[in-house]
Image (cartoon, rainbow, N blue to C red):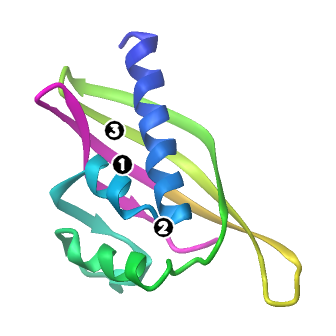
């Protein structure tokens, strides 16, 4: 894989996380396939299909509140010219109700597929906080 593809996928992943952090539904929707699938703690062990589940959290102002994301130890693997897997540790920093800084850790894997020249997130798996 060339470095520009790797860099593009990491930038898109960071942009996606920023859209979640800022509650930017339009950007999130633009970066995700409408048939997005996911395993995440909020799904309580069930496979989540489609965007409606995620839209609920955006409409409520986000389930993590105001926060900052940092991608740590990223790994990009191109499976095909049009399919890639991006795995990383996501550090989520925020301020709690007592005005104390806190950090949560998630392990995430995102599957990206290139369609019509644009990468779309088609599946992700996010672990419970550790």
Residue 114 spot, x, y in % from top left: 19, 32
The reply to whether callout 3 and callout 2 are in contact (CB within 8 Å) is no
**Magenta range:** 108-130
Residue 97 as seen in the image, left or right of residue 106: right
Q: Nearer the viewer, mark 3 or mark 2?
A: 2
Whole-angstrom CA distance, mark 1 to mark 3, is 6 Å
Residue in view at x 42 percent, y 38 percent: 12
Whole-angstrom CA distance, mark 3 to mark 2, is 24 Å
The C terminus: image quadrant: bottom right
Marking on residue 110: 1
Q: Is residue 47 visible?
A: no
Residue 67 spot, x, y in % from top left: 66, 66
Q: Secondary structure at mark 3?
A: strand
Crowdedness of circle 1 by 10 Å Cα count: few (<14), some, many (20+)? many
The reply to whether callout 1 and callout 3 are in contact (CB within 8 Å) is yes
Residue 61 as seen in the image, left or right of residue 94: left
Q: Is residue 107 above or below residue 75?
A: below
The N terminus: image quadrant: top left
Q: Which residue is mark 3?
A: 85
Residue 29 spot, x, y in % from top left: 28, 57
Main SS of residues in magenta:
strand
């Amino acid at each position: 894989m060339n470095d520009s593809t790797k860099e593009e996928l990491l930038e898109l992943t960071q942009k996606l996380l920023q859209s979640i952090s800022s509650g930017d539904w339009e950007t999130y929707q633009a970066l995700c396939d409408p048939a997005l699938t996911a395993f995440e703690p909020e799904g309580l062990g069930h496979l989540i299909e489609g965007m409606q589940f995620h839209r609920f959290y955006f409409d409520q102002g986000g389930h993590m509140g105001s926060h900052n994301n940092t991608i740590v130890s990223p790994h990009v693997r191109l499976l095909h010219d049009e399919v890639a897997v991006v795995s990383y540790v996501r550090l989520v920093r925020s301020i709690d109700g007592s005005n104390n800084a806190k950090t949560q850790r998630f392990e995430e894997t995102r599957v990206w597929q290139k369609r019509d020249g644009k990468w779309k997130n088609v599946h992700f798996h996010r672990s419970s906080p550790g």
